Amino acid sequence: MAAPPTPMFSDLITPPPAAQADALERFTRLLHTAWADGSFVSLLLSRHIGADEQLERLTVRELHLRGERQLSFLWRYRTRDVTKNHPGAEGLAQIAALLGREFQNAHLHTRSQEVQLAFSRKGKPSLRTARAAAPLTVEPAAHDKPKQRPLALDTAFWLDLGVTHEVRGERQLVPAMSRKWKQINKFIEVLGAALGSSPLADRREVHVTDFGSGKGYLTFAMHEWLRSQGKAPQVTGVELRADMVALCNAAAARHGLSGLRFDQGDVRSYTPTRLDVMIALHACDTATDHAIHLGLRAGASIIMCSPCCHKQIRPQMQTPPLLRPMLQHGIHLGQEAEMVTDSLRALLLEVQGYETQVFEFVALEHTSKNKMILAVRKSGAALAAAEQRRPELLAQIAEIKRFYGLREHCLESLIDGDARAAHANAGVAPTRTPDPAGSSA
């Protein structure tokens, strides 16, 4: 598609000063209003342009200190975090001084809406607002509330994996691993919540397979955390790279971690003997679909995926006329393809009897690959209710495919292949929901 022509004389058009100031003024007014009426949730300042090259982001949240509402500033540097607390008025004045001078992006979350302020390279501010998908009910943190860290840094294997090092006889976090450590702990927090609401909650033996385990950070963490919960974990990391498999197996053996092992393999060919929890983080493109499919075939109680590299859907997408002005931009088309791909994955998991969520499992400042698809298998009355919704969900999937002109979605094809094989073995012709797009995928 040819790029749209640049409007004539656009280089001669300069917004008047009042128009430039309006977006910044409106954002500041919204921030003050949200703080005054108690609807403030958080503020993220990014795209740092100040003199300190180590400074990256600033996150601002509310906390209660000695009965007084305050703003807690978390300054994010490349190798450290600095927290400072300010009274409301003082904190708001400091934020106003940073906007457009130190940071070029500001993202305000309130209980009812999201507001984003962005400055162009020439310093022109623009404002975007959107209503929150659901009312936020985040409670302000107490100042003296300890951080909920489910893992201990002094565990011996973290030294082997390069997460900690010895400093004057004391084990400390390697500064460059601070973000990774937060990701690991957040992942364990999500896993713990999923486990508690799954059929595995009261089961002592839990079988976990972590596909694409890499250096084993999450694999070791899951094994250690499950043991601390009184479980008898059988955790397997599956990784293509032989050197990583050897490194992790050596560390597990060195510390006598029974029930933890690493195998060389690929999600498309590896078959675990038993699978209760299926993990696949940053599996590229359709590898995520194959991982989910493996979890479905094994009847996994929990499926956790962090998708990456959404390539299959984008070339198929036919831009609906209504969306063409927006999707003419490549970045928007890519984001739309990502959203459609993962929405279909979530719906397909619901069809299979899972309660599914798609969410940001760590903040964007820690990693750009921060989306997670979490699916927990339903049981009892919840599963029966899900069966009744199956026709509705299938109709939604078909309508999305029709709207975008999609011919095939990998996970849907894998599930349909299983259904056809099962019907063939039973000697019954499979029935499928008609595809409004007219494809046979």
Image (tube, grey):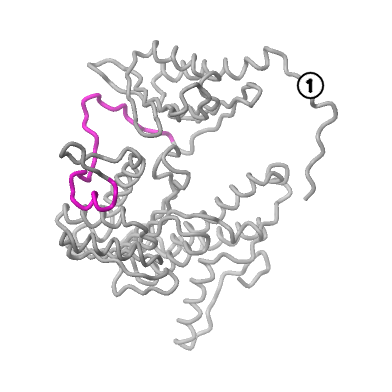
Residue 101: x and y, percent? 54, 18
User: Residue 57 or 355: which is nearer the viewer?
Assistant: 57
Label 1 Cα crowd, 10 Å radius (few <14 / some 14-19 / many 20+):
few
Q: What's drawn in magenta, residue-wise?
A: 135-163
Secondary structure, magenta segment, majority class? loop
Q: Give the mark count.
A: 1
Q: Amino acid at mark 1?
A: Ile
Q: Which residue is outermost to the right? A: 8
- Helix, strand, or loop for circle 1? loop
Residue displayed at 59% across by 29% down = 128
In the displayed structure, would residue 35 be above or below residue 267?
above
> Residue 271, located in which quarter of the rendered image?
bottom left
Q: Which residue is mark 1?
A: 13
Assess whether residue 159 is covered by the magenta stretch: yes
Residue 165: x and y, percent? 24, 43
Residue displayed at 37% across by 65% down = 239
Residue 215: x and y, percent? 34, 56
Relative horizontal placement of residue 363, taking residue 237 as reference (left or right): right
Residue displayed at 24% across by 41% down = 149
Relative horizontal placement of residue 320, taking residue 417 as reference (left or right): right
Residue 278: x and y, percent? 35, 62
In the displayed structure, would residue 272 be above or below residue 427?
above
Relative horizontal placement of residue 209, taking residue 282 as reference (left or right): left
In the displayed structure, would residue 150 be above or below residue 282?
above
Residue displayed at 21% across by 55% down = 226
User: Residue 219 or 199: which is nearer the viewer?
Assistant: 219
> Residue 141, located in which quarter of the rendered image?
top left
User: Residue 207 or 203: which is nearer the viewer?
Assistant: 207
User: Residue 362 or 293: which is nearer the viewer?
Assistant: 362
Assess whether residue 282 is covered by the magenta stretch: no
Quarter of the picture containing the C terminus is bottom right
